[in-house]
Amino acid sequence: MVYDVLFLLSFAKAISSGVIDECFVENQVNNQAVRRPSQLAQACSNNNQAFCAELFDPPANVAGNNANPAMSYNVNDRCQNAALKAEAIKICPRSCAFCCLTPQYNCTNENEENCNLFLTMPQFCTNPDISAIALAKCPRNCGLCNQPGAGGRCPDTSPNCAVLVALAGCKDTNVQRNCMGTCNIRSSTTGGPPTCSDDRANCAQMQRFCTVEPFAATVRQQCRKTCAITGGASARPDDRANCAQMQVQRFCTVEPFAAIVKQQCRKICGLYT
């Protein structure tokens, strides 16, 4: 039904716009409030670029204002239409500057100031040496909100959690057991010892974080078997050959990266001679 409406709208050539009302930051310019897209407003991609360009891209007559940081950013009025907004978020989030509302970005970071690094240097989000930090501490800035373990949360084990939570609520024991991610449960609530199995496929690579704070609690919860068996052996001083190439020295005292950097690159951080 929604697609039928969108198809009919594609024949309507008159396009209007309105000031952005989601995923924005507000600044004062010449004593006037100016709304501009946040850094995450257009961090994602459309799912059908041709379709989105036709229906949800901002009209051409506002392109100049949108490029001017002293002017409020305008989006296509269809983006703000209550009947179409859900589809705009799903299909055309970049065109509507709705990326911060998509599943991969719609969560919170532990500390916004500490997580700014991932906005200025997004390549760190996929760097294998600190990707665990990105997932556990800064999932929003890296677009990892819909990944198991994001923000330290346990993953859902049922594909029907939306229905289960709606029917029984998060206080139900079975829902808590199967929908820990949806219910934002960070540790077992059953009172007994957790099942000795790993929830993540890459626990072997995460082993070194089993005893490294502030990530140990999250890793031990998601990689219970690996951490119990290995004990989380720590790396030797500057065991990583690329400590210098990664230019990690600047992070030796910057949280939340300091703990892992000092543990793997002790010499470059001045902890070993």
Image (tube, grey):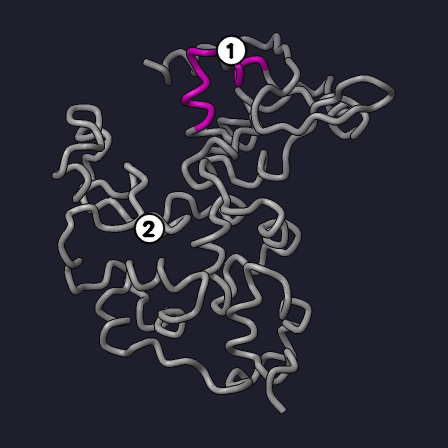
Element at badge 2? loop
Taking the image as shown, residue 112 lies to the left or right of residue 140, namely right
The amino acid type, in three-letter code, at marker 1 is Phe
Q: Which mark is residue 148?
A: 2
Q: Residue at x 76, y 30 (%)?
A: 67
Q: Are marks 2 and 1 in contact (CB under 8 Å)?
A: no
Which residue does the numbered mark 1 point to in the structure image? 11
Residue 175 lies within the magenta run: no
The amino acid type, in three-letter code, at marker 2 is Pro
Write down the quadrant of residue 243 in the picture: bottom right
Q: Residues within 10 Å of mark 1 (few under 14, many from 20)?
A: few
Quarter holding the C terminus?
bottom right
Which sits in the foreground, 241 or 178? 178
Q: Provide residue 202's location: percent of width, then percent of height.
A: 32, 66
Which sits in the foreground, 44 or 254? 254
Q: Residue at x 52, y 65 (%)?
A: 127
Return the residue found at the far front: 191
Taking the image as shown, residue 111 lies to the left or right of residue 1, namely right
Q: Residue at x 52, y 34 (%)?
A: 99
